[in-house]
Amino acid sequence: MGLLTGILLLPLAPVRGVAWLAERVNDAAEHELYDPSVLRARLAALNEALDNGEIGTEEFEREEERLLDLLEHRLFRTPPAAAGPAARPQEPTTGAHR
């Protein structure tokens, strides 16, 4: 970066700093949301809450399904929010047309 460019872009430094910080916070949040060890700990706490009668079976099943879906996405795919058309596996192509 040249001296003139650096001087002209200096007023944007706080914006770039905030953007960098927001990216770091987002990375940390995604790590906590999709980290398998965190998801397993939440599943264990959910099982304990059911055993102690703190939650009902219906609530347990809903939350368990959500946590297992998150764990599956983390272990076998990209995070659901980041999955887009480019992230989906392509169907293998063969020479035959359907």
Image (tube, rainbow, N blue to C red):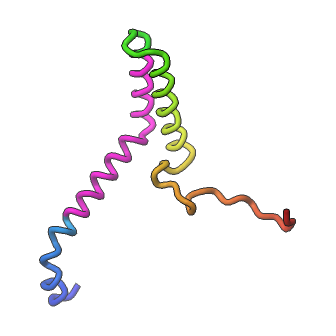
Specify start and end residues of the magenta stretch as a single range.
18-47
Main SS of residues in magenta = helix
Residue 50: say if magenta: no
Residue 30: say if magenta: yes
Residue located at (25% from left, 63% from top): 19
Instruction: Name the image quarter holding the N terminus.
Output: bottom left
Using the image as rendered, state which of residue 15 and residue 75 is in the foreground: 15
Asked if residue 22 lies left or right of residue 57, the reply is left
Residue 3 in which image quadrant: bottom left
Instruction: Report the number of discs.
Output: 0
Q: Return the x and y of residue 44 as percentages of the image width and height.
A: 43, 22
Q: Return the x and y of residue 87 as percentages of the image width and height.
A: 56, 58
Residue located at (32% from left, 48% from top): 28
Asked if residue 34 lies left or right of residue 8, the reply is right
Residue located at (16% from left, 72% from top): 13
Using the image as rendered, state which of residue 5 and residue 57 is in the foreground: 57
Residue 33 in which image quadrant: top left
Q: Return the x and y of residue 64 as percentages of the image width and height.
A: 49, 27
Q: Return the x and y of residue 36 as percentages of the image width and height.
A: 45, 37
Instruction: Name the image quarter holding the C terminus.
Output: bottom right
